[in-house]
Amino acid sequence: MSRVDPAAVAERLAALRGRIERAGAGRPVGIVAVTKGFGAEAVRVALDLGLTMVGENYAQELLAKHTALESDPPAVAPRWHFLGRLQRNKVRQLAPLVAVWQSVDRAELADEIAKRAPGATVLVQANLSGEAHKGGAALADVPALVAHARGAGLDVEGLMGVGPAGGPERARTGFRALVALADELGLPERSIGMSADLEVAVEEGATLVRVGTGLFGPRPPRGPAAP
Ligand SMILES: *Cc1c(COP(=O)(O)O)cnc(C)c1O
């Protein structure tokens, strides 16, 4: 497991806050510390720096980090945000741990979360890039999915989207469409923007940015045995 240097992360966090500030938020923008690819140490470092929202993409990785933290529980527990593509059969194990399900992209997944974690806080993920592997419902299908999730008793707080690869400006149109739709649906939370495109996201109205490499440095490559 590659080492996470707390001083380096603190430095990157200061730079990150500067970037958010300069992008002209003038309003609070939450930072979700994305620790995928790093060990539980990264979670401890994030918590020590006051970052309590911790993002994970893979069920097994989240569960493993939770278990690792239990040996020496941090003073403040992480609020796990689940960000990745999620199979229904993983929901049961995650349900006691996840605070915010950011990647709800289909009705069956909403139903399973509602069954295993009644009333849970979720974001509906919209696909902004046309790339199927990034998950997300088509924007046109998002209003019905929001209604479905609400009908299932979930607390739908907002929308999440992942920008396309190929440079931050390419993300602007999609981010703008997501924010417009969130406005229309009366949803306050907009989780858009990652390390590479967070300025554009903040300019377009992000309330949450999800930052991995911008805090922890380059991710170690995922090995063949990774979950
Ligand atoms: C990996 C990931 C992030 C963080 O990406 P960085 O480029 O490392 O900031 C954010 N959101 C999702 C959905 C991700 O998969």
Image: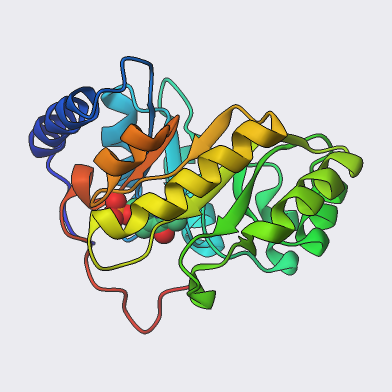
Specify whether residue 198 is in view: yes
Identified at 74% across, 62% down, the residue is 106
Residue 209 is situated, as x and y percent measured from the top left of the image, at: 38, 38
Q: Quadrant of residue 219?
A: bottom left
Furthest residue toward right: 151
- Please give the count of numbered marks on the rendered protein: 0
In the figure, 192 relative to 227: above or below? Answer: above
Q: Quadrant of ligand 1?
A: bottom left
Quadrant into which the N terminus falls? bottom left
Q: Position of residue 63 (x, y in %)?
A: 54, 54
| In this picture, residue 198 sits left or right of residue 177 | left
Q: Is residue 52 above or below residue 217?
A: above
Relative depth, front residue between 108 and 113: 108
Residue at coordinates 15% horizontally, 52% vertically from top-left? 217
Q: Is residue 14 above or below residue 173?
A: above
Residue 98 shows in this picture: no
Find residue 71 and report its image quarter: top left
Q: Is residue 180 left or right of residue 32?
A: right
| Residue 158 appears left or right of 154 | left
Q: 186 and 6: which one is in front? A: 186
Please name the colour scheme applied to the rendered image. Answer: rainbow
For the point 19% across and 33% down, which residue is it? Answer: 16
Q: Nearer the viewer, residue 171 or 67?
A: 171
Q: Residue at x 60, y 27 (%)?
A: 188
Q: Position of residue 135 (x, y in %)?
A: 56, 67
Question: Is 135 displayed left or right of 8 in the figure?
Answer: right
- Across and down, in percent, residue 154 comes to 80, 38
